[in-house]
Amino acid sequence: MLFTSLKFVAFVIAVLFLYYAVPKKFQWVLLLCANLFFYIQAGIYGLVFILVTIATTYISALSICKEQENIKRLFEKYKDILTKEDKKMYKAKSKRTQKLYMILCLIVNIGILAVLKYTNFFILNFTNMKPVNFILPMGISFYTFQSMGYLIDVYRGTVKAERNPARFALFISFFPQLVQGPINRWKELSSTLFSYHTFSWKVIQSGVERVIWGYFKKLVIADRAMIGLAVITSDNVKYSGAYALLGMLLYAVELYADFTGGIDVTIGIAEMFGIKLAENFKRPFFSKSIAEYWRRWHITLCAWFKDYLFYPISMSKWMNKLSKAVKKKCGNAIGSRLPVYISSIVVWFVTGLWHGASWNFIVWGLLNCAVMLISQELEPVYEKVENRLHYRRFRYYKVFEILRTTFIVCSLQMLDYYYNISDAFRMYISIFTTANYGYVLKTGMWNIGLKVQDYAVLILGVLIIFIVSMLQRKRQIRKSLDSRPFFVRFIIFLLLFLAIASFGIYGIGYESSQFIYNQF
Amino acid sequence: MKRKSFAAMCIMTACFAMTACGNSSQNTTAGGVNNESQIENGSKYVFETSGYSVKVNAKISECLEKLGEPKGGTYEVKSCAFDGMDKFYYYGAYTIQGYQKDNEDLVYSVTFMDDTVKTPEGVRLGDSKDKMTSAYGSSFNQDGEQYIYTSGNTKLIFVLKNDVIENIIYELNQ
Amino acid sequence: MKKKIIRILAIVLIPTACLYFLQLLFMPKYVSDINEGSMIEEYYKSSKNHEVLILGDCEVYENISPVTMWEEYGITSYIRGSSEQLIWQSYYLLEDTLKYETPKVVVLNVLAMQQSEAKSEAYNRMTLDGMRWSFSKLNSIKESMTEEESIISYVFPFLRYHSRWSELTSDDIKYMFNKPNVTTNGYLMQVGVRPMTVAPQEVPLKNYQFSERNYNYLDKIRQLCEEKGIKLVLMKAPSMYPYWYERWDTQIKEYEDKYNLLYLNMIEQSEKIGIDYTTDTFDYGQHLNVDGAEKLSKYLGKILKDKYDLADYRNNQEYQKTWDTLTEQYHREKENKLKEWENIQ
């Protein structure tokens, strides 16, 4: 069931209706049934995998939690008898058992993900065997991460394991977020997921508004940009130079509108159920550096990597030892940087791999890492220059920084859609070396499946997003909209709705497309 | 504006379906694609005549240059309501059917009209089923009386009646 | 409370109304171009008291002129033809027409028997969109849909045609609520001559057998006609392409014999009809021009009149007015189109 299909819209409406019709204590059960239905629609095959993840994570987390409680009870019961050493020993032993549970569960689940997603990558790169045909279960990258995050949280003792397997299953499989995130944390989501929700027009209206906004971005902007991009990437001999630049812009627009639009739909739908999901974006294209960009784009994924990969590596005992050893041999400068460098490289390697099982994504991830590390290293230089020239006080310097970041992001993204790395670099260079700008402007850009009206819609759409983003800097635009009279809001969203209906890329006239992030 | 764009959009489908108020080139059962021998933009099944290979999807203009004007004439068929145009080139012993794609006439199929021509593998109308299988093997898809060999962009179709080849067609594999 | 009701009404009604008007705007108008898309819906504006109903594809709507049959014999006829009309589409159109009138004779062109599957969404649209909603329409859609299509896009054509937003012309506004007729009782007049210089040859086919599905629908047409006391006439129009194969003809003849119907193979009788393929066709023998159509209509009309004892309505006042208008329109159209053709030449 695609988010953009009428079937999905009908499904959501039906579930909503039932959700507020059943007694409140069954609301979450109804959602669970809806998830089951939603998942079965995608094929019974995928259901097996998500059930395995749910079952293993549930059992492991519960075992870990029980172990934690046991040790607590033990200490409590024998607090007079146990010496400090005893306690330490028991604790260590218990921790080892807990760790075992966690690691087993991690191996099973990351293993499933790795086998399904990366077997072919391995086969193609390191063997002569034929690729295998695996069907990726829907949203596997997202639900695996969400459940592993929960598991680690339980291990760390920051959350308590859920005792009701059905409730846990709902947390992992909540259908609006199943397909493309955001990756939620148990701590934040569980309270709103299981509480009682009373029907209110206001809640529905607010959710609908966000959904409309999301569909507008997805159907009117992203899918339209996609048409041109598909043509440009279909032939990278013909479409170089100015075409490549156009492609770069189209992809930036497409990816942004597609992913943020999809998340708007997700969050909006959850909102209608009274459930608050984590935000995933904060105007990423207003970032002044790549590091900032990654704090504002796909926030939940980046936070996940930070909490569950970056810190564990950089703060680990062996890293500490290594750092100390290097400090001794090569000096403080290198020794103190080592943990950050190693963990950053690992994290970005994995981030790349998470986005796709191919080298282009890995290179893309590592290049992002390189840019960040280099700019970090250059920071003292900037400081020096700043102290002399005070350029940062210059009014438009911020704008320059934003444009610079945007340009770097867009440049790196070329690796996402030219799957071949050398192609990506060749096309990137061609932007500066191929002098076909006049031709493309005059004829070329009108022959890639986009008409003048399409460009107009694209530009207008991007402009609307830009204005909305500008307004968001100063105030919460949703709140200020709320204070307007009903009919003002109604007309705004009616226009958006009609724009989606008329200009949206759907139906036989166009090939309807999936959200990009579904495939990860 | 020559035509409404609705039509423009339909032309592709219309001419691909080779329709002219419904003509004969229907019933194209999708044959399984022969993975190992799939040749990009080509096929191992190509009809040859007068030292020239008539490839499916080749430009008609090139065929005419090499084979000369068809002696039986050319027949043009306009699709009902739409712009699509199919053309038949009657060469006597075989007929080439053309279709239009991106304003260019391309070869859609080659049909044998009598037994004076044979495939490069030596099979002609009137031959036995055994001859067909010894020349082409038995990895065909069967659809009723049709035996379909697929390779790349071409389907080579034999129609058999009582184990005798009644018809041989090279056709675009869509 | 009152405020709430007004709001809910606004939320429901205003978008619906907007979508409805946008749908009217986006639907193809088929007036200045691709007239074939207008034909099916035009029927509902007709007088609906015809003795002869003609069903089929372009071989009927470009080859038979009801006005000529009226002028010659006083036969009242209507052609419910459409591009690439498939045999089940003919059946459902028959069902549909019978809701409004019961003709004495149904003439069915049999070319469609050789096509067992809908191949083009565009043709489906032109046959189906124009039908009024009924189970006949729904069933016809279900039978016709190609893989890419969905019923919902027939229920709400907006979903199909919204992509036309960037292609709208003045026609789309001009004919949003009201469209002029493009045919005369279903006859789409073609003028001009493009002679047939090369005759289409008998290129062998992979398969000559009409499909079971098509036979089923032919049976259904026959049974429905029997039920309503309508005489069914099978006809193969004198179009030279698509080539009408002997083996197809045999199958129809067998059917004719089996059920004691009348089958008219007009290709065989083209000499008798007087068709000259160097002057009577506008597209190299595929369809007749107005001269050819008038010849065929005279011939067909005579057979129908003699065999089925059709009444001559020319002196019937009830019919006169309608048909006078039609006749006048027809001749004016012919004159204009001929002038246009001469200008192109």
Image (cartoon, coloured by chain):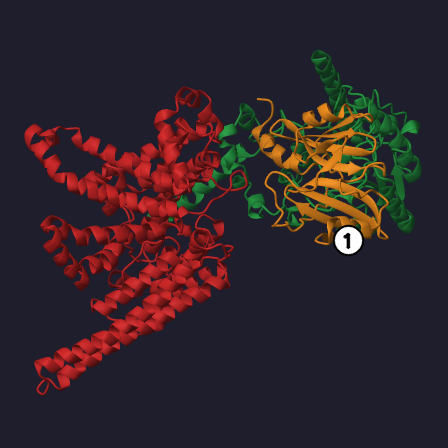
- 10 Å neighbourhood of mark 1: few (<14), some, or many (≥20)? few
Quarter of the figure with residue C56: top right
**In this rendering, position of residue C175 left or right of residue A463:** right
Residue at image location 23% in from the left, 35% down from the top: A402
> Which element is circle 1 on?
loop
Q: Is residue B13 visible?
A: yes
Q: Residue furthest left?
A: A387
Give chain B's shade. orange
Identify the residue under disc 1. B144
Q: Quadrant of the C terminus of chain B?
A: top right
- Return the x and y of residue A38 as percentages of the image width and height: 45, 60
Q: Quadrant of the N terminus of chain B?
A: top right
- Return the x and y of residue A430 as percentages of the image width and height: 38, 29
Q: Nearer the viewer, residue A420 or A457?
A: A420
Give chain C's shade. green
- Residue A318, above or below C318: below
Q: Is residue A211 visible?
A: no
Q: Amino acid at mark 1?
A: Gly
- Residue B59, above or below A287: above
Quarter of the figure with residue C80: top right
Residue at image location 25% in from the left, 74% down from the top: A98
- Return the x and y of residue B69 as percentages of the image width and height: 77, 23
Chain letter for mark 1, please. Answer: B
Chain whose colour in the figure is red: A
- Return the x and y of residue A30 as percentages of the image width and height: 40, 65
**In this rendering, position of residue A241 left or right of residue C112:** left
